[in-house]
Image (spheres, grey):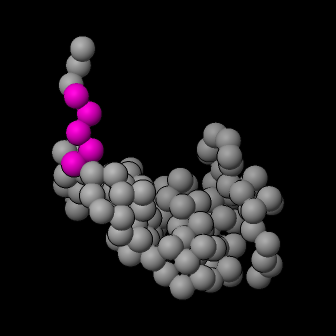
């Protein structure tokens, strides 16, 4: 019942919405690029999409961007920027588990 899942088609629609400035679509596109769903893995584009969504206060994107900075996904490792992303997300903490506060307290081993 329903429509068969098609990750390539899904990414196509995410990208169309992302180009129009939709932060949720930018985040979803970033996930697709990061894990290679519907496309080849592309850490640089994942980082770019997360950054665009984070600039629009998308909390999930802020956490993802922090992980990119922490692990060097699509960018150089920058623990200070990772901390800033996690802290901004934690300040907006409208998230289910794992919350940005949890990520900040348990996985980040840096201090600004």
For image coordinates 68% across by 41% down, the residue present is: 97
Confirm whether residue 62 shows in the render. no
For image coordinates 49% across by 81% down, the residue present is: 75
Is most of the magenta stretch helix, strand or loop?
Answer: loop
Q: Please identify the quadrant where the C terminus is shown.
A: bottom right
Q: Residue furthest top?
A: 1
Residue 76 colored in magenta in the image: no
Give the image location of residue 58, x and y in percent. Answer: 49, 55
For image coordinates 35% across by 69% down, the residue present is: 42
Is 71 placed above or below 21 here?
A: below
Is 101 placed above or below 43 here?
A: above
Give the image location of residue 8, x and y in percent. Answer: 22, 48
**Residue 88 location, quadrant:** bottom right
Give the image location of residue 109, x and y in percent. Answer: 79, 72
Q: Looking at the image, how many numbered discs can be counted on the residues?
A: 0
Which of the two residues, 54 or 37, is positioned nearer the viewer here? 37
Which of the two residues, 36 or 68, is positioned nearer the viewer here? 36
**Residue 96 location, quadrant:** top right
For image coordinates 36% across by 57% down, the residue present is: 36
Q: Is 42 left or right of 87, judged from the image as shown?
A: left
Q: Is 8 left or right of 97, judged from the image as shown?
A: left
The part of the chain drawn in magenta is 4-8
Q: Please identify the quadrant where the N terminus is shown.
A: top left
Confirm whether residue 71 shows in the render. yes
Give the image location of residue 46, x and y in percent. Answer: 40, 66
Which of the two residues, 22 or 45, is positioned nearer the viewer here? 45
């Amino acid at each position: 019942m329903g429509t068969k899942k098609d990750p390539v088609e899904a990414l196509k629609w995410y990208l169309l919405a992302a180009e129009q400035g939709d932060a949720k679509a930018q985040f979803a596109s970033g996930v697709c690029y990061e894990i290679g769903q519907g496309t080849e893995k592309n850490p640089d584009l994942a980082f770019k999409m997360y950054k665009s969504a984070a600039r629009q206060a998308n909390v999930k994107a802020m956490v993802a961007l922090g992980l990119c900075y922490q692990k060097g996904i699509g960018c150089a490792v920058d623990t200070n920027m990772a901390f800033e992303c996690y802290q901004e997300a934690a300040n907006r903490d409208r998230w289910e588990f794992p919350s940005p506060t949890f990520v900040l307290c348990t996985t980040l081993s840096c201090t600004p």
